[in-house]
Image (cartoon, rainbow, N blue to C red):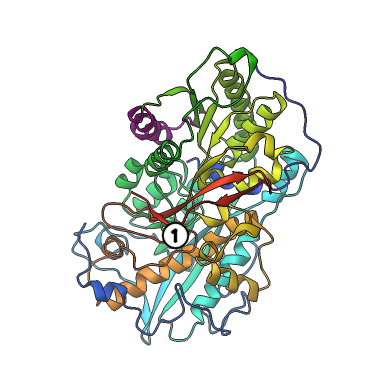
Amino acid sequence: MGQVAVRRRAAGAGKSTVAALSLALLAGCGTTVSGASALRATGSDSGLNGGTPTSDGLGGPSTTGGSGAGATGGGGSGQTVAGGGTTSGSSTASGGGGATTPGAPSGSTGVPQLPSSNGRVTLRLGVVYLKGLDQAYKAANGGKSSATDSKADYAAVIHALNTAPGNRVTLVPSYYAIDASSTQSQADQQQAACASFTSDVKTDIVVSYTAGASGSLAQCLAKHGIPLIDAAAGASVGASVQRAVPTMWQPSQLSLDRVGGLEASYLVRNHWVDQRWGTAARCATVKQPRIGVVTFDRPDWRAAYSRVVAPTFRAAGQPVYDVEFLAVSGSTAQQLAQASSGAQNAVLKFSSDCVDHVAFIGNVALDYLFMDVAQQQNYNPRYGLSSLEDPPVIVQNLTQPAAQLRGSIGPGWSPFSDVAAAQLDSMAKRPAATCLSILQHAGLTPTDNNSTFLALPSCEGPMFAQFVVRTWLAAGQHGTLLDVVNGLHSAYVPVGTYSADLSAAHHDGAAAYRGFAFTDSCSCFRYTSGLRSIP
């Protein structure tokens, strides 16, 4: 089929789209420690997870006593370390492996060998952060993104955690920047980050906004026994990838399989596809609803569709009529161009086939690009969404959101991805409150949903890393950090989602969701339910 002709948007239209979609596009894609009470013990480390931060240590990224958060700038091969210095030949070492590393496979005979002195444990933290979103957006669309200074955010959070009263786990960061504006592919940059943290810098745990396509970054680090905390709230890898990489921990995420099952079952239960939607004259003879699904053309995304999404709809008597797998790879600009072309083709196919219900298992990039073309073609299906799609950003960027989004519903587990800031109630604001307080005291308050979503991994990663080590200490330093994560269950209070449940069965922690729906009166999304458990 030929491509739909697409009009150029005015410069500045869709200002904040790339900031959020870049995260999604760039991501691509044992026994327990004994004693439940010990796993939940915090000892004297008060206020470090789920509590209210004190005025001490909330003033910003400056360093104190050699345990601060590191210098600004940098990235690539010029790694920065605590106190603002750069790595040198004397500090170069392998990230380790085998039984002596913190993330060693459960059942190994070794225990973590974390540097310590005066009763304090030093955790060497590799930080993979994203920069260049503004430049990437300007190059792609001539606008300015609503972004955040991720490195400054990390520095402020790490400083606050290190200087909190009673803290015994000092985080010593080394930074590596993934540049969204670079012509180098994101996969190559992530592999370079892995090489740095396994060869150039001594690292115990790496935190990031992504695990890489199909968990490639996590898999690379795992070969050296280094755990990766993928701290974004959303979904990026399938359940099979999670099982293959037990040292990949995602406290506020869902696997793609769990997202697919949650979304498909939610849509059916909430009467999304009970009858035909729309009144296109050429489709008047079609009496039954037709479902189309849009997702990525990557192995774990395809697997989630074939193993969970399609069977769930089929079992409910509403089989998927059309599915479009969109392939994206390379640099940010290349991925955006490929996603745009794929979205155009999907709109043409679905419209021609009289598909009247479209469910997305993708991200805001696919959604927005699809809807933008659909809007131009007067194609208005009923959409099924989730937190993965970032509905408020879609509303912000469509010129006629009411026409495109009327009737849209879905389940959400990531508050700042679900509804606009003005629609957040106290329940939705609670998870990120401590994080936002730290950033506010540091003069780094995010300006809207989009920049907040981008900032939250800067809190989640360091907070979860510190919490796991504190729990290991409280449990008498038995086993590995993987054993600790396997036994956390609901002990950790997450930043990006309502509640977490982590166990040996799964390391994607998001455990509860709320229903949301597009509301015509405000042209916005609002929550329509209280908390419900995620299977």
Query: Residue 168, image x and y in percent?
Result: 40, 81
Query: Residue 83, image x and y in percent?
Result: 57, 75
Q: Nearer the viewer, residue 214 or 291?
A: 291
Q: Nearer the viewer, residue 375 or 74?
A: 375
The disc labelled 1 sits on which kind of residue? Answer: Val
* Image point (44%, 48%), residue name: 217
Query: Residue 232, image x and y in percent?
Result: 50, 54
- Residue 481 colored magenta? no
Per the picture, the main secondary structure of the magenta-coloured stretch is helix
* Image point (64%, 72%), residue name: 440
Q: Is residue 70 above or below residue 13?
A: below
Q: Badge 1: few (under 14), some or many (20 or more) residues near its Cα, within 10 Å? A: many
- Residue 300 colored magenta? yes
Q: Is residue 187 left or right of residue 471?
A: right
Q: Is residue 269 left or right of residue 16?
A: left
Residue 46's quadrant in the figure? bottom left
* Image point (30%, 45%), residue name: 244
Q: Tell me the element at label 1.
A: strand
Q: Give the magenta-colored segment's residue range.
A: 295-316
Q: Which residue is mark 1?
A: 206
* Image point (68%, 45%), residue name: 523
The image quadrant where one finds the N terminus is top right
Query: Residue 85, image x and y in percent?
Result: 58, 71
Q: Nearer the viewer, residue 528 or 255?
A: 528
* Res. 68 in view: no
Residue 402's quadrant in the figure? top right
* Res. 534 in view: yes
Count how many numbered circles sit on residues in the image. 1
